[in-house]
Image (spheres, rainbow, N blue to C red):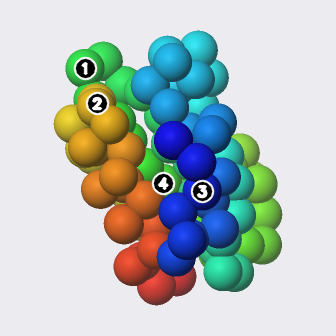
Amino acid sequence: MGMREDLKIPLTMLSISFLDKLPYKGSYNGKRFMFEKIDAGLKVYVWKDLYSFENTKPEDMTIKEFEYSKDGIEKGIDFVEGTEV
């Protein structure tokens, strides 16, 4: 994967092999996000670009789960892009 033209999230790091080892955190358009492997799924968190994940309350985040696959990652990216915080 390379960079999608319409998105600033670098997809070279955001892959199944990366997520098998570590969560992927970043920021985009005034919001922060994290992609995390959970059991057999993918959990994506989005919150205002004010604090780190560890310093943000869960109720201040928008959280959604996806299938743990390349397609799930793409849907997670769409979720990050479309979520208003």
Under mark 4, the amino acid is Tyr
Please tell me which residue is depicted at 78% across the width and 63% down the height of the picture: 51
Residue 68 numbered mark, or none: 2
As measured in the structure, the alpha-carbon distance from the residue carrying label 2 to the one carrying label 4 is 15 Å
Crowding around mark 4 (Cα neighbors within 10 Å: few <14, some 14 to 19, many 20+) is many
Please tell me which residue is depicted at 78% across the width and 72% down the height of the picture: 50
Whether residue 33 is visible: yes
Under mark 2, the amino acid is Tyr
Callouts 2 and 1 close, C-beta under 8 Å: yes
Q: Which residue is mark 1?
A: 40
Q: Percent position (x, y) of residue 34? A: 57, 48
Q: Percent position (x, y) of residue 70? A: 32, 37
> Quadrant of the rendered structure where residue 24 is?
top right
Under mark 1, the amino acid is Ala
Q: Which residue is mark 4?
A: 45
Crowding around mark 3 (Cα neighbors within 10 Å: few <14, some 14 to 19, many 20+) is few
Is residue 76 rendered to the left or right of residue 12?
Answer: left
Crowding around mark 2 (Cα neighbors within 10 Å: few <14, some 14 to 19, many 20+) is some
